[in-house]
Image: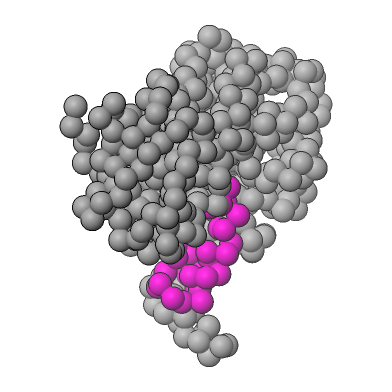
Amino acid sequence: MKRLFLAGLAIITLLHPGTGIQTRFPLASSPAKQVAADRLQWWREARFGMFIHWGPVSLKGTEIGWSRGDQVPVEVYDQLYRQFNPVKFKAEEWVAVAKEAGMKYIMLTSKHHDGFCLWSTQTTSYNIMNTPFHRDVVKELSAACKKEGIIFCTYFSILDWHHPDYPLGSPGGKTKKPSPNMPRYVQYLKTQLGELARHYGPLGIFWFDGEWEEPWTSEMGLDLYRYCRSLQDSVIVNNRVAKARKGMEGVSAGGEFAGDYDTPEQRIGSFQQNPPWESCITICQQWSWKPEDKLKSLQECLRTLATCAGGDGNLLLNVGPMPDGRIEPRQVKRLKEIGAWLKQSGSGIYGTRGGPYQPGAWGASTWKENKIYLHLFEVLPSGLELPSLPRRILSSKSISGGNAKVLQTPTSVQVHLDPVLKSGSVTVLELTLDGEAGTIPPVSVAGQKK
Ligand code: FHN
């Protein structure tokens, strides 16, 4: 066994010279793959998490980070923390909302591009303890998560337009710092990550962002990945730790070191079993809070979640809390509606893998053991025709109400819903097969003939 392990490690070192770290699900059957798979298992089974973009900028209702020096003059933006006093902030309430929404992990912007820190850090005075609020938000939220069995995770921006040592001072590097010191900035960044892991861990994920600017390199990313795993070996690190991410698709360009998983942004990732992926999408339009920001419909939220799971990915759905510390009631209402659907149909999401029917306008499918879950979006009165299955369907039932008839022929699987699909919802059918569903090759579903 040990010899086999060392052989596996040797292969990995070959793949990523000098890294010697197990990432990215290398060779199929290597022990390293199992190690990496085990480390990501809780997250792959969780499928659904809450992203939280928050900070003093919520006082302005403009976009976090990006509005600095744009809608909000830098000198005004950087002083907002002196008025930041979210007295209605209750970490237990945020966790309760996430739990009721059916979310299994919470991802807080511990530090975004504006450099403001939501924890009691020794590295800079530009932090939450120097606001009128004077309470450690990361501490309270990580504790509340732990109490409720929700995995606490931290978003952390690599770029910092506020810190004097980070070379660039605004988007696109329009402004440059007078006397930057990148090596010292990297040390500052590492010290902060050390504080987060030691004082609020174990953490589920280090979700990096802001890696796209020129001062950050692949080498720095590789080194930072190794550093994070040395802080906490079980931590998961996204692909924005280095430079592999190609745009908002969030997938990683081959050959580049790319952390543990891909991160499509504001879009649903394509059907992809490896590397794993997680789409981060706003429940409104803006990441941080904006008054009357356009809220996504329940239908869009449910179809987005089902399509992510059907594509074998996770959904990280974002909320932007208000400056008084509450998550906006209408966002809470929407989240509870999602949770109600998951209470009824969650067995088709949690702990499942995507496929075998690839997502489309028709819907999406997931599987677990000998079950396939059809998440139906559009089913015409004439029914839905899916490609045939190399397994026999022993039984079928709707787990979200309504009756369905499923007819299997040598060339197709035909689905008829009675009553026809109520508009806006997602009906889930559970098909029980005469054997394991996981070995069925993924297949795309042709558009339904009107
Ligand atoms: O600039 C950020 C943005 O504010 C937000 O944090 C998203 C979340 O994934 N990421 C960046 C844009 O890629």
Residue 41 sits inside the magenta stretch:
yes
The figure's colour scheme reads one colour
Quarter of the view holding residue 150: top right
The residue nearer to you, when weighing 361 against 329, is 361
Question: Furthest-left residue in view?
Answer: 449
The residue nearer to you, when weighing 399 against 241, is 399
* Residue 115 position within the rendered picture, expressed as x and y whole percent measured from the top left: 60, 33
Residue in view at x 38 percent, y 64 percent: 439
* Residue 367 position within the rendered picture, expressed as x and y whole percent measured from the top left: 45, 52
Is residue 338 in view? yes
Q: Write down the region rendered in magenta.
A: 19-46
The residue nearer to you, when weighing 157 against 403, is 403
Is residue 217 in view? no
* Residue 195 position within the rendered picture, expressed as x and y whole percent measured from the top left: 72, 49
Residue in view at x 68 percent, y 50 percent: 203
Residue in view at x 51 percent, y 44 percent: 349
Q: Is residue 113 left or right of residue 354?
A: right
